[in-house]
Amino acid sequence: MELNTFLLLCMPLILCFFLLQFLRPSSHATKLPPGPTGLPILGSLLEIGKLPHRSLARLAKIHGPLITLRLGSITTVVASSPQTAKLILQTHGQNFLDRPAPEALDSPQGTIGWIPADHVWRSRRRVCINHLFTSQSLDSLQHLRYKKVEQLLQHIRKHCVSGTPVDIGLLTSAINLNVLSNAIFSVDLVDPGFESAQDFRDQVWGIMEGAGKFNISDYFPMFRRFDLLGVKRDTFSSYKRLYEIVGGIIKSRIKCRASNPMSRNDDFLDVILDQCEEDGSVFNSDNIQVLIVELFYAGSDTSTITTEWAMTELLRNPRLMQKVRQELSEVIGAGQMVRESDMDRLPYFQAVVKETLRLHPAGPLLLPFKAKNDVELCGFTIPSNSHVIVNMWAIARDPSYWEDPSSFLPERFLGSKIDYRGQDYEYIPFGAGRRICPGIPLAIRMVQLVLASIIHSFNWKLPEGITPLTIDMQEKCGATLKKAIPLSAIPFIEEN
């Protein structure tokens, strides 16, 4: 049942629970940022819709770059400009480090993304960065990424022979999952024929969709135990499936280490199992499973989404696709494999990736923050315990910073020093501040390598009946923003 329909049906019940609370006089007055009045009890919940990044951007145009929404019993402040985002993520960053975990998540205390920003968070984050995301760690596994991309290209060549379309997002998801699974525990999650790719992608999306839904349990906490919309139940089925797979690998490794202490893969799983044996460790047999599942859904989904949107935009713009192919041909050469070391010599291709991240950020709303204390911003008061959302999608389309912001124009990044590492607040596709995404180095390498490889190795055309003007561009929103209708394209190799 949709949230809006459910709330309307349950209005009498909600009213009974909250009437007395809302009639009680407030103990202190604060000057909140402006915003819509909203309905009694529900506030502005019915205004959010299925695409909250767009709804919130529309409200910001009416009320300003810093607005207040009452969502059920939760006061929520939304920032929709580079200036307000910088105030929250940098100037007052210490006050906005914690996050309110959605009810749909399983064991958020075992994660990096949702755990409060305490010493446990810092320790977990440090281990992940040092053993998965440093340049040295990534360079050591470069051969693995090349091997997986070659497997992808071999699979696509079969489609060239048969003339059948390729599901770009599905195959990209499989490669991203296998790169991560080999870095974490030295095995492929997806089979060589990619037959299990759809199941894994469905489980990953099940979690991301649940984590991003505007769920009644998150805005009326007294209803949490009932899971009235079934969001937690649906999400848990995806967790359960991934826990079965990941848990089995962890148990097998623990058993192997116990029987032969000298047996090691020296991968990420060995690193955190070593730490489990240390006194006072932030890792144990329960939370390492939660952490690894988080790495899979967070690490694979965003890279997959970016690659699919990039291919979509290039197929919509044949002139740009030809420009990218020409640059790849001149720099890399016909029949040669793309290498990560080639990227610095591909300025137009890099501009395409940057423009994709601007126009289609994988996470259009940064994961929400929770104010520790009252803080003054732009002459308004952000009260303690209020939720704070940064609308990255709206910021990246702000006409004050971006000319023709709704158009896909890679040229805007040629010669530009704007980067995605959180220093330029008009462009923060991975967030900014202390809770910036730690996996940026791997995400960028994977998007660039996979995208460049499939463009350089093959020509692409749309299936019969679809033209560049009729490609479906609808979005589907969870914690990430994916293409609602998967992109299918037919690869072929031109005869010289």
Image (cartoon, rainbow, N blue to C red):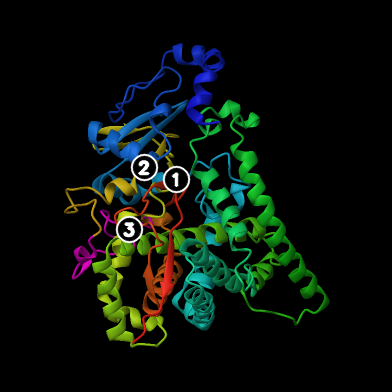
Between residue 325 and residue 423, name the one nearer to us: 325
**First in sequence: mark 1 vs mark 3:** 3
Q: In the image, residue 292 lies at what x, y percent?
A: 61, 61
The overriding secondary structure of the stretch rendered in magenta is loop
- Quadrant where the image shows the C terminus: bottom left
- Looking at numbered disc 1 in the image, what kind of residue is underneath it? Cys
CA–CA distance in space, label 2 to label 3: 28 Å
Mark 1 sits on what residue? 477
Q: In the image, residue 80 lies at what x, y percent?
A: 29, 43
Mark 2 sits on what residue? 53
Of tags 2 and 3, which is closer to the observer? Answer: 3
**First in sequence: mark 1 vs mark 2:** 2
Q: Is residue 54 visible?
A: yes
Mark 3 sits on what residue? 467
Residue, x 77% and y 74% (percent of image)? 257
Label 3 crowd bin: few (<14), some (14–19), many (20+), radius 10 Å:
few
Figure check: 442 above or below 21: below
CA–CA distance in space, label 1 to label 2: 9 Å
- Looking at numbered disc 3 in the image, what kind of residue is underneath it? Thr
Q: Is residue 420 visible?
A: no
- Looking at numbered disc 2 in the image, what kind of residue is underneath it? His
**Residue farthest to the front, as pictured:** 465
- Quarter-wise, where is residue 74 in the image? top left
**First in sequence: mark 2 vs mark 3:** 2
CA–CA distance in space, label 1 to label 3: 25 Å
Looking at the image, residue 349 sits to the left or right of residue 280; the answer is left
Looking at the image, residue 273 sits to the left or right of residue 153; the answer is right
- Quadrant where the image shows the N terminus: top right
Callout 1–callout 2 Cβ contact below 8 Å: yes
Of tags 1 and 2, which is closer to the observer? Answer: 1
Between residue 210 and residue 37, name the one nearer to us: 210
The residue segment tinted magenta is 409-431
